[in-house]
Image (spheres, grey):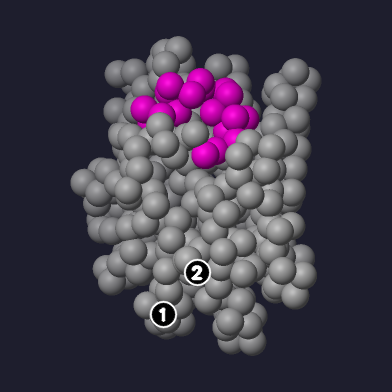
Amino acid sequence: MSTTHRFAVLGVAVLAASSLAACANNASGSSGAAAAGGTSSSSVAANAPKVTIMIGGMSKQIYLPFMLAKRLGYYDKAGVNVNLIDEPAGGDATQNMLAGQVQGVGGFYDHNIALQAQGKSSEAVVSMLQIPGEVELCRSDLKGKVKSPADFKGRSLGITDVGSSTDFLTQYLSKKNGVDPTQENRRGVGAGQTFIAAMKQKAIDCGMTTEPTVSKALSDGTAFILLDMRTAEGSKAALGGTYPATSLYMPTDYVNANKDTVQKLVNAYVATLKWIQAHTGAQIADQMPADYYSGVGKAAYIKALDSERGIFNPTGIMPADGPPTCLAVLSEFNPKVKGKSIDLAKTYTNEFVQAATPLS
């Protein structure tokens, strides 16, 4: 019997803080960033196409390009009116896309493989991260007791939520190290304060998360790093190859029917990825909403950005060896994917990135 379930009780204060942060993120995404020196999409021409994108945890550094494009005014320059909505879990964002509530999702590319296995067609139109940027943290009091995923049996493991990419990766790492995923408790604890609270209250033993949560958990001694996928070497050691992560993915029917709109979006993201490569962590942080780093402090946020800036894809092109690695990972444990014939060429396209034009 599956023991995956949602972590529900963290304490009134933590939940209230989390809710306020989520509201702040939603407000930033929907109305633009004029108050902090950015540009609101409201200045786009009235006839500009409108697109709503749901992001699986907007304040995570791995999803930074979506908000950064808005703050830099690149959606305006590309000629598209973008509404960004925060959803803490990638799996939920995907379901909202399938229900037609949003046109696209800012999430991990691997969801497209899982969807095709279920008879649904979606594709990544731009690849933003070359590697996952995920870190497996464990409670400090377990150092020496948990030495690898081989010690996950019977443990409570934090994931963003059921069906998220952290759920996929946690199950793969468990199985790869000889632990049946049904012999562990995977609990949806989100990220940021809810993740850290779950660890401090010993509701989870280990958990997979990203920056800036990683830096916060390390800074006060709450956790230690078990596995680090913020580098190409760490990702290949853990997952066996290149594992492209953050992308913008959309239903194939929408992409085919709205190619001009998709091209405008990709133009904005390619420009953003190039901007990231040409600027320091401090310069990037200066563009972001203050609530993105309020939980860890701006200095720690900048340090994390500088240390992991290599995770961002400088071109937007899908790495050729990436999709096969993602398929191999999902095929190991996901019964909906295992044994299925997957046409990887239909899970992503480089068409729009290759046709991207500079923004004036």
Between 288 and 293, the residue placed more toward the observer is 288
Amino acid at the residue labelled 1: Ala
Q: Which mark is residue 266?
A: 2
Q: Which mark is residue 323?
A: none
Q: Are marks 2 and 1 in contact (CB under 8 Å)?
A: yes
Label 2, label 1: how far apart the Cα atoms are:
9 Å
Residue 288 lies left or right of residue 326; in this view the side is: right
Amino acid at the residue labelled 2: Val
Q: Residue at x 45, y 28 (%)?
A: 301
Question: Element at badge 2?
Answer: helix
Q: Residues within 10 Å of mark 2 (few under 14, many from 20)?
A: many
Q: Main secondary structure of the magenta part?
A: helix
Task: Answer whether residue 359 is visible to the viewer in this image.
Answer: yes
Using the image, determine if residue 306 lies above or below residue 330.
above
The residue at the far bottom in this view is: 257
Residue 126 lies left or right of residue 20; in this view the side is: left
Q: Which residues are magenta?
A: 287-304
Indicate yes or no whether the magenta region holds residue 34. Answer: no
Q: Which mark is residue 355?
A: 1
Between 130 and 27, the residue placed more toward the observer is 27
